[in-house]
Image: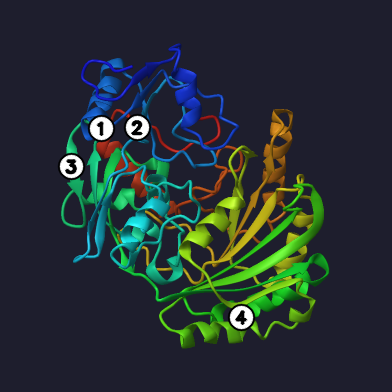
Amino acid sequence: MSSQGFVGAVLRQGHVEYEKARHATVWRENTPLRFPSVIVKAECVEDVIAAVKLAEAEDLPIGVRSGGHSWTSPHLRDKSVLIDLDAMREIEIDPESRTAWVRPSVKGRHLNDALAEHGLMAPTGHHDTVACGGFLMCGGFGWNFRHWGNGCRNVVEIELVNAQGELLIANEHQNQDYFWAARGGGAGFFGVVTRFRVKAYPRPKCLRANGYVFHEDAFEDAMRWAYEIRAKLPTNCEFVGSWTSWDPETGDWAPTRFALSGLMFADSEEEAEAVSALFDTCPVRDKAVMRRRNEPTTLEERYTGATMADPAGFRFAADNVYTDKDADEIVPLIRAMVESMPTPRTHIFWQYNGPRPDFSGMALSGWGDTFFAAYPLWQDPAQDAQMQKWVVDAMHMLDPIANGEGQMNDENMEAHPQNYLTVEIAARLEELRARHDPKGRFLSFLTPGAR
């Protein structure tokens, strides 16, 4: 259904296609019970401008959806205009400048498929289902981010529609407030980004995987070893761990497994081998039930493997904390959280971020040298309340080590609010919102009680 002035469909609450369109804006099965008054399925920039003007005419706030992968879905709000950008997926690559203009709903995997034709790569999200819009605006902890920088650091320019319905270009030389806020401001951004220009890098010559899988009797020793070597690993090595208790063949409960892996984005075999040599120092490697040593892999394999952890057809919740504590304080708390996992497909994730980077020139500011997150997966709607409670309780188990900051995108802002920006940066973001969107046309973060 199209309306006058729009190329894409405009669906008001009660329309026969409305509920299908509402559910489609959320990638998980448990769609929040929040109902926009109007969903605009934008197909072009002109649709976005028209949607902003529609919201002004009807005095409704605006939510914006790129890929819908957000765990809390802050774009989906009651009595609002939801601008769904899903149809806007164009990519324009400039190999000479090593940059690409991408629409918000371009999936990261599709961007890297296109960049590969030019021998290039960008630090996109790890899952097939993650679009560039929310990923870039919320920080962007993507492939090789410790080496190339967070996704938002690699945004060099944006095209946006502001609260007045004007189409603007923002970069470090013009409309700097918008440029600053788009790089890490997440759902607090006061406009609609319709294109990002992002940096790309020469594709690494060899992608190599190292890793161990342990049963729970070795996890404490393995974890302490991980803390010993993590700072010795080069920045172009992603170092992560995960705990799970499911049988890949049956989907049922299985003995808990702890996997540690280092993915090396290397430019030479010698560089890759040096990381493998560090992995050889693991004191409990003989207890590993599976090992990968310097195995060739591909980005396509890595996307597929990451997406398998969070497959389609499930209900999800998520939460996370940052910490700067060491293994002696962390390990006992993690064991208690792992032992409480409520479903076989539930998993807990650990990632080494490294020292706090220079965040000048951008809103991104929350950080910890280590990231912990928990993700319960279930299929029975009757378990919704139980699972939502578990993930918050699990994070509270880590209160003694948490630094009070969390990562956007994997957050649970509505039920477990933390600082996702430093106090100073959050204050500046709100001051800019008041200046550039004085009527509060654009919805902000989904904080407790926000609808």
Q: Which residue is at 52% across, 37% downward?
A: 27
Residue 155 lies in what quarter of the image?
A: bottom left
Name the residue that disc number 2 marks: 442
The answer to whether 422 appears left or right of 405 in the picture is left
Picture disc at residue 236: none
Q: Which residue is at 26% across, 46% downward?
A: 178
- How packed mark 4 is, by other alpha carbons closer than 10 Å (few <14, some 14-19, many 20 or more), is few
Front in this rendered view, residue 315 or 290: 290
What percent of the width, then of the height, locates residue 450?
50, 30
Say which element carries label 3: strand
How far apart are the alpha carbons under marks 4 and 3?
46 Å
How far apart are the alpha carbons under marks 1 and 4?
48 Å
**Three-letter residue code for mark 1:** Ala
Picture disc at residue 163: 1
What percent of the width, then of the height, locates residue 246?
75, 52
Picture disc at residue 168: 3
Front in this rendered view, residue 109 or 57: 109
- How packed mark 1 is, by other alpha carbons closer than 10 Å (few <14, some 14-19, many 20 or more), is many
